[in-house]
Amino acid sequence: ETGVTQSPTHLIKTRGQQVTLRCSSQSGHNTVSWYQQALGQGPQFIFQYYREEENGRGNFPPRFSGLQFPNYSSELNVNALELDDSALYLCASSPGVSTGELFFGEGSRLTVL
Amino acid sequence: GNSVTQMEGPVTLSEEAFLTINCTYTATGYPSLFWYVQYPGEGLQLLLKATKADDKGSNKGFEATYRKETTSFHLEKGSVQVSDSAVYFCAPPPMDSNYQLIWGAGTKLIIKP
Protein backbone atom coordinates (compact mmCIF):
# COMPACT_ATOMS: atom_id res chain seq x y z
CA GLU A 1 0.00 0.00 0.00
CA THR A 2 1.53 3.30 -1.10
CA GLY A 3 1.17 6.19 1.31
CA VAL A 4 0.62 9.86 0.56
CA THR A 5 3.51 11.46 -1.28
CA GLN A 6 4.11 15.15 -1.84
CA SER A 7 6.46 17.07 -4.10
CA PRO A 8 8.57 19.06 -3.96
CA THR A 9 9.72 18.68 -0.37
CA HIS A 10 11.30 22.11 -0.22
CA LEU A 11 11.17 25.14 -2.47
CA ILE A 12 12.02 28.82 -2.41
CA LYS A 13 10.06 31.47 -4.30
CA THR A 14 9.96 35.24 -4.38
CA ARG A 15 6.99 37.51 -3.77
CA GLY A 16 4.56 37.69 -6.66
CA GLN A 17 5.55 34.35 -8.12
CA GLN A 18 3.28 31.34 -8.50
CA VAL A 19 3.76 27.85 -7.10
CA THR A 20 2.26 24.42 -7.72
CA LEU A 21 2.47 21.70 -5.12
CA ARG A 22 1.59 18.11 -5.88
CA CYS A 23 0.14 15.25 -3.90
CA SER A 24 -0.50 11.59 -4.63
CA SER A 25 -3.21 10.13 -2.44
CA GLN A 26 -3.07 6.79 -0.73
CA SER A 27 -4.37 3.88 -2.75
CA GLY A 28 -8.14 3.55 -2.43
CA HIS A 29 -8.67 7.09 -1.13
CA ASN A 30 -10.92 9.43 -3.12
CA THR A 31 -10.65 12.53 -0.93
CA VAL A 32 -7.75 14.93 -0.60
CA SER A 33 -7.45 17.85 1.81
CA TRP A 34 -4.82 20.56 1.88
CA TYR A 35 -3.57 22.32 4.99
CA GLN A 36 -1.22 25.20 5.66
CA GLN A 37 0.92 24.94 8.77
CA ALA A 38 2.93 27.96 9.82
CA LEU A 39 5.92 27.40 12.08
CA GLY A 40 4.81 26.51 15.59
CA GLN A 41 1.13 26.52 14.66
CA GLY A 42 -1.55 23.95 14.04
CA PRO A 43 -2.75 23.07 10.55
CA GLN A 44 -5.17 25.46 8.86
CA PHE A 45 -7.65 23.93 6.44
CA ILE A 46 -7.36 25.27 2.89
CA PHE A 47 -9.79 23.07 0.97
CA GLN A 48 -10.89 19.56 0.26
CA TYR A 49 -11.47 17.70 -3.01
CA TYR A 50 -13.77 14.75 -3.44
CA ARG A 51 -13.99 12.97 -6.77
CA GLU A 52 -12.44 15.89 -8.62
CA GLU A 53 -14.75 18.53 -7.12
CA GLU A 54 -13.96 21.05 -4.39
CA ASN A 55 -16.44 20.28 -1.60
CA GLY A 56 -15.15 22.35 1.27
CA ARG A 57 -13.01 25.43 1.71
CA GLY A 58 -11.41 27.23 4.62
CA ASN A 59 -10.73 30.93 5.05
CA PHE A 60 -8.18 31.35 2.25
CA PRO A 61 -8.31 33.86 -0.62
CA PRO A 62 -9.08 32.81 -4.21
CA ARG A 63 -5.39 32.94 -5.17
CA PHE A 64 -5.24 29.55 -3.43
CA SER A 65 -6.73 27.08 -5.88
CA GLY A 66 -6.55 23.40 -6.55
CA LEU A 67 -7.34 20.46 -8.73
CA GLN A 68 -8.02 16.81 -8.27
CA PHE A 69 -7.39 14.37 -11.10
CA PRO A 70 -9.23 11.17 -12.06
CA ASN A 71 -6.61 9.10 -10.22
CA TYR A 72 -7.39 11.25 -7.12
CA SER A 73 -3.99 12.91 -7.02
CA SER A 74 -4.16 16.64 -6.43
CA GLU A 75 -2.44 19.96 -6.95
CA LEU A 76 -2.41 23.11 -4.86
CA ASN A 77 -1.71 26.33 -6.73
CA VAL A 78 -0.89 29.61 -5.09
CA ASN A 79 -0.71 32.78 -7.17
CA ALA A 80 0.83 36.14 -6.32
CA LEU A 81 2.86 34.73 -3.45
CA GLU A 82 3.18 36.78 -0.30
CA LEU A 83 5.75 36.53 2.47
CA ASP A 84 3.09 35.15 4.84
CA ASP A 85 2.55 32.21 2.52
CA SER A 86 5.81 30.76 3.83
CA ALA A 87 4.73 27.57 5.59
CA LEU A 88 4.59 23.80 5.48
CA TYR A 89 1.83 22.68 3.12
CA LEU A 90 0.33 19.36 4.06
CA CYS A 91 -1.76 17.09 1.91
CA ALA A 92 -3.96 14.45 3.49
CA SER A 93 -6.01 11.75 1.86
CA SER A 94 -8.94 9.83 3.29
CA PRO A 95 -11.39 7.18 2.14
CA GLY A 96 -14.34 9.56 2.44
CA VAL A 97 -15.34 13.17 3.04
CA SER A 98 -16.65 13.02 6.56
CA THR A 99 -14.05 10.93 8.28
CA GLY A 100 -11.53 12.52 10.61
CA GLU A 101 -9.08 9.76 9.84
CA LEU A 102 -6.57 11.48 7.58
CA PHE A 103 -3.35 10.14 6.14
CA PHE A 104 -0.79 12.89 5.70
CA GLY A 105 2.18 13.30 3.45
CA GLU A 106 5.48 14.67 4.70
CA GLY A 107 4.62 18.14 3.43
CA SER A 108 6.11 20.72 1.11
CA ARG A 109 8.10 23.45 2.83
CA LEU A 110 7.60 26.73 0.96
CA THR A 111 9.76 29.76 1.67
CA VAL A 112 8.78 33.08 0.10
CA LEU A 113 11.49 35.74 -0.01
CA GLY B 1 -20.18 24.71 15.73
CA ASN B 2 -17.21 23.07 17.36
CA SER B 3 -14.34 24.83 19.10
CA VAL B 4 -11.31 23.03 20.45
CA THR B 5 -9.17 23.93 23.44
CA GLN B 6 -5.99 22.03 23.90
CA MET B 7 -3.58 22.01 26.81
CA GLU B 8 -0.83 24.57 26.30
CA GLY B 9 2.75 23.45 26.02
CA PRO B 10 5.50 22.84 26.08
CA VAL B 11 5.15 19.97 28.48
CA THR B 12 8.53 18.80 29.74
CA LEU B 13 8.85 15.43 31.44
CA SER B 14 11.57 13.02 32.40
CA GLU B 15 11.77 9.62 30.77
CA GLU B 16 9.37 7.06 32.28
CA ALA B 17 7.11 9.78 33.69
CA PHE B 18 3.32 9.66 33.35
CA LEU B 19 1.83 11.82 30.61
CA THR B 20 -1.57 13.53 30.39
CA ILE B 21 -2.56 15.96 27.67
CA ASN B 22 -6.06 17.42 27.76
CA CYS B 23 -8.34 18.44 24.93
CA THR B 24 -11.77 19.96 25.39
CA TYR B 25 -14.32 20.74 22.76
CA THR B 26 -17.89 21.83 22.52
CA ALA B 27 -19.49 19.15 20.44
CA THR B 28 -22.63 19.62 18.45
CA GLY B 29 -22.66 15.97 17.59
CA TYR B 30 -21.58 12.59 18.81
CA PRO B 31 -18.45 12.80 21.00
CA SER B 32 -15.35 11.37 19.38
CA LEU B 33 -11.84 12.63 18.86
CA PHE B 34 -8.72 12.02 16.84
CA TRP B 35 -5.22 12.46 18.21
CA TYR B 36 -2.45 13.17 15.76
CA VAL B 37 1.28 13.33 16.40
CA GLN B 38 3.90 15.34 14.53
CA TYR B 39 7.51 14.34 15.05
CA PRO B 40 10.19 16.97 14.35
CA GLY B 41 10.46 17.73 10.65
CA GLU B 42 7.66 15.37 9.65
CA GLY B 43 4.01 15.50 8.66
CA LEU B 44 1.16 14.52 10.94
CA GLN B 45 0.34 10.92 11.75
CA LEU B 46 -2.86 9.57 13.19
CA LEU B 47 -2.03 8.31 16.66
CA LEU B 48 -5.42 7.08 17.77
CA LYS B 49 -9.09 7.82 17.82
CA ALA B 50 -11.45 7.62 20.73
CA THR B 51 -15.17 7.23 20.29
CA LYS B 52 -18.13 6.97 22.64
CA ALA B 53 -18.24 7.84 26.29
CA ASP B 54 -15.89 5.74 28.40
CA ASP B 55 -14.43 4.02 25.34
CA LYS B 56 -10.65 4.24 25.26
CA GLY B 57 -8.72 4.35 22.04
CA SER B 58 -5.18 3.05 22.33
CA ASN B 59 -1.99 2.80 20.28
CA LYS B 60 1.78 2.64 20.98
CA GLY B 61 1.15 2.74 24.72
CA PHE B 62 -1.03 5.83 24.45
CA GLU B 63 -4.65 5.84 25.53
CA ALA B 64 -7.40 8.39 25.07
CA THR B 65 -10.25 8.56 27.52
CA TYR B 66 -13.41 10.64 27.17
CA ARG B 67 -14.84 12.28 30.26
CA LYS B 68 -18.50 12.98 29.61
CA GLU B 69 -18.97 15.35 32.56
CA THR B 70 -16.33 17.76 31.25
CA THR B 71 -16.62 16.94 27.53
CA SER B 72 -12.89 16.43 27.51
CA PHE B 73 -10.54 13.84 26.13
CA HIS B 74 -7.30 12.97 27.87
CA LEU B 75 -4.32 11.52 26.06
CA GLU B 76 -2.31 9.45 28.51
CA LYS B 77 0.78 7.29 28.57
CA GLY B 78 2.07 5.48 31.60
CA SER B 79 5.79 5.72 30.85
CA VAL B 80 7.05 8.13 28.22
CA GLN B 81 10.25 7.74 26.21
CA VAL B 82 12.55 10.28 24.61
CA SER B 83 11.19 9.13 21.24
CA ASP B 84 7.73 10.40 22.25
CA SER B 85 9.01 13.98 22.00
CA ALA B 86 6.73 15.56 19.41
CA VAL B 87 3.75 17.86 19.01
CA TYR B 88 0.36 16.30 19.72
CA PHE B 89 -2.81 17.62 18.11
CA CYS B 90 -6.42 16.79 18.86
CA ALA B 91 -9.28 17.16 16.42
CA PRO B 92 -12.94 16.19 16.58
CA PRO B 93 -14.39 14.67 13.40
CA PRO B 94 -15.85 16.99 10.76
CA MET B 95 -19.28 18.19 11.74
CA ASP B 96 -20.18 20.87 9.20
CA SER B 97 -20.81 21.00 5.50
CA ASN B 98 -17.25 22.22 4.93
CA TYR B 99 -15.90 18.83 6.08
CA GLN B 100 -12.95 20.48 7.75
CA LEU B 101 -11.32 19.32 10.94
CA ILE B 102 -11.09 21.93 13.67
CA TRP B 103 -7.64 21.41 15.15
CA GLY B 104 -6.37 22.17 18.60
CA ALA B 105 -3.30 24.40 18.76
CA GLY B 106 -1.06 21.45 19.54
CA THR B 107 0.86 20.51 22.67
CA LYS B 108 4.61 20.23 22.37
CA LEU B 109 6.00 17.39 24.47
CA ILE B 110 9.66 17.32 25.45
CA ILE B 111 11.00 14.19 27.12
CA LYS B 112 14.37 14.48 28.81
CA PRO B 113 16.54 11.38 29.36
Image: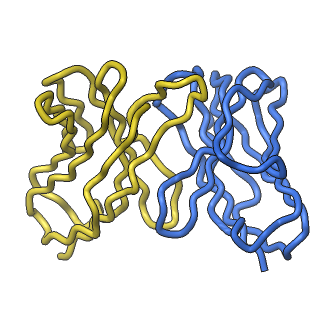
Query: What chain is colored blue?
Result: A
**Where does residue B25 sit, x and y in percent of width and height?**
30, 38
Q: Going 63% across and 25% down the picture, which residue do you hit?
A: A29
Q: Going 20% across and 71% down the picture, which residue do you hit?
A: B12
- Vertical relation: B108 (above or below) B50: below
**Where does residue B47 sit, x and y in percent of width and height?**
35, 42
Tell me if B58 is positioned left or right of A51 in this view. Answer: left
> Is A105 in front, or is B102?
B102
> Is B72 in front, or is B18?
B72
Q: Going 80% across and 32% down the picture, which residue do you hit?
A: A68
User: Quick one: quadrant of the C terminus of chain A?
Assistant: bottom right
Tell me if A106 is positioned left or right of A67 in this view. Answer: left
> Is B81 in front, or is B71?
B71
Query: What chain is colored yellow?
Result: B
> Is B36 in front, or is B10?
B10
Tell me if A36 is positioned left or right of B82 in this view. Answer: right
**Where does residue A15 sit, x and y in percent of width and height?**
85, 74
The part of the image, by quadrant, that contains residue A91 is top right
The part of the image, by quadrant, that contains residue A10 is bottom right
